[in-house]
Amino acid sequence: MPLRMNMRKFIPIIFSILILLILIFGSACLTQSSSSQKTQQDVGITRISSTADSPYISFDIAQQNLLTYQPDSTSQSAAIKTVYTIHGMNVNESGYAASWIFGVRISNVTELLAYGPGGWIKIPYNTLFPSEEIDVGKIVPPGRLFSQNNAVILGNPSRTISERRDLDLKQGIYTLTIASDSTVRTLTFNATTGELII
């Protein structure tokens, strides 16, 4: 009899513990599923960084825009036929430039076109282009050129002197001019392999 009385006292306690355990497990499941749903939603709306946020433009973007460039929207035949020179103005450590300038032939006319954050600008010029064409599909892109030759281009990474880099490509050779307040360095690279020319 006393055993039955003791069991009756413990039944509410056991029942309370069971309810408490169910609540704990239930809230853990809800928390886990809602956090996983939140993660999935966050992934869906994650913003991918765009080059529009940067003043620098990759060569790939400029070159793609060059392929679709039409000086006259009414003429479908006026497309870029040949590239003779490429110039990257104010190139950063990744090989992106503030603007890319292309010396091109459109129909039978040679033009100097600059591509920057505002789009295309035609530049007046009075110099002749080299006779050798640039096959853009066979060159090392500037981004890869910079990563491949990072040590020689950037030199001592601990320096505090700001530098300006301008990159020229003509007749199969990249010429990189690096200017600081006191010095100017010039490096040349094979445009097909990206190797430094000593």
Image: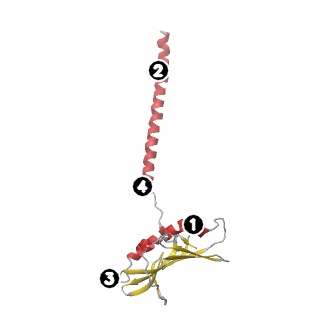
Closer to the observer: label 4 or label 3?
Answer: 3
Q: Secondary structure at mark 2?
A: helix
Q: Horizontal and vertical percent for residue 104?
A: 42, 82
Tell me whether the residue at label 4 lies in contact with that at label 2, contact meaning CB atoms closer than 8 angstroms.
no
- Identify the mark nearer the N-term, 3 or 1: 3
Check the image and report above or below for 192 versus 104: above
| Residue bearing the label numbered 4 | 44
Tell me if mark 1 has few (under 14), some (14-19) or many (20+) residues whose alpha carbon lies within 10 angstroms of its own.
some
- In the rendered structure, which amino acid carries the disc numbered 4? Gly
Residue 14 horizontal/vertical position (percent): 48, 23
Callout in the foreground (4, 2): 4
Q: Which mark is residue 11?
A: 2
Disc nearest the viewer among 4 and 1:
1
Estimate the spatial distance between the alpha carbons at disc 4 and disc 3, rounded to whole Å. Answer: 42 Å
Who is closer to the viewer here, 17 or 185? 185
Mark 3 residue type? Ser
Q: Image point 57% across, 66% down: which residue? A: 150
| Alpha carbon separation for disc pair 4 and 1 | 35 Å
- Reading the image, the residue beneath label 1 is 150
Residue annotated with mark 3: 77
Assign a secondary structure to mark 4.
Answer: helix
Tell me the element at label 1: helix
Q: Nearer the viewer, residue 60 or 99?
A: 60
* Disc nearer the start of the sequence (4/3): 4
Residue 46 lies in what quarter of the image? Answer: bottom left
CA distance for labels 3 and 1: 41 Å
